[in-house]
Image: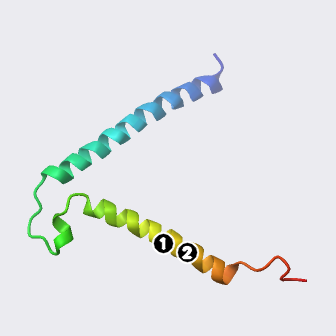
């Protein structure tokens, strides 16, 4: 077997195991978030299950939407701009 094919096969196996480990870690984190009690909430959302995941997702979407809107307003020029 050629060394490059051997390396690729080893990396492929590590990738598969790494993804399994990644998904197992995600599931464990969700379980911990659900069952570990929150102490002294600072605001109402602090006690909601999955609040920070939802907050992070919405924040990411807003950053993308606002960045695209600003890009279209200030960066894009018409095709005949230099004519």
Marks 1,2: beta carbons within 8 A: yes
Task: Identify the image quadrant of the N terminus.
Answer: top right
Tag 2: Cα neighbours inside 10 Å, few (<14), some, or many (≥20)?
few
Q: Which mark, residue 67?
A: 2
- Residue in front for this viewpoint, 19 or 65: 65
- Residue in front for this viewpoint, 4 or 81: 81
Tag 1: Cα neighbours inside 10 Å, few (<14), some, or many (≥20)?
few
**Residue in view at x 68 percent, y 80 percent:** 75
Image spot of residue 33 (x, y percent): 20, 53
Residue of label 1: 63
Drawn side of residue 15 relative to residue 6, left or right = left
Image spot of residue 22 (x, y percent): 37, 41
- Residue in front for this viewpoint, 8 or 81: 81
Task: Identify the image quadrant of the C terminus.
Answer: bottom right
* Image position of 11 with respect to 49: above or below: above
In the image, farthest residue toward the right: 83
Drawn side of residue 76 relative to residue 20, left or right = right
Total marks shown come to 2
Image spot of residue 54 (x, y percent): 32, 62
**Residue in view at x 83 percent, y 83 percent:** 81
**Residue in view at x 39 percent, y 62 percent:** 57
**Residue in view at x 40 percent, y 69 percent:** 59
């Amino acid at each position: 077997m050629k060394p490059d094919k051997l390396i690729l096969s080893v990396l492929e196996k590590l990738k598969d195991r790494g993804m399994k480990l990644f998904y197992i870690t995600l599931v464990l984190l969700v379980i911990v978030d659900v069952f570990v009690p929150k102490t002294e909430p600072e605001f109402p959302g602090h006690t909601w299950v999955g609040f920070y995941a939802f907050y992070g997702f919405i924040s990411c979407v807003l950053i993308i939407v606002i960045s695209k809107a600003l890009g279209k307003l200030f960066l894009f020029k018409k095709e005949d701009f230099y004519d």
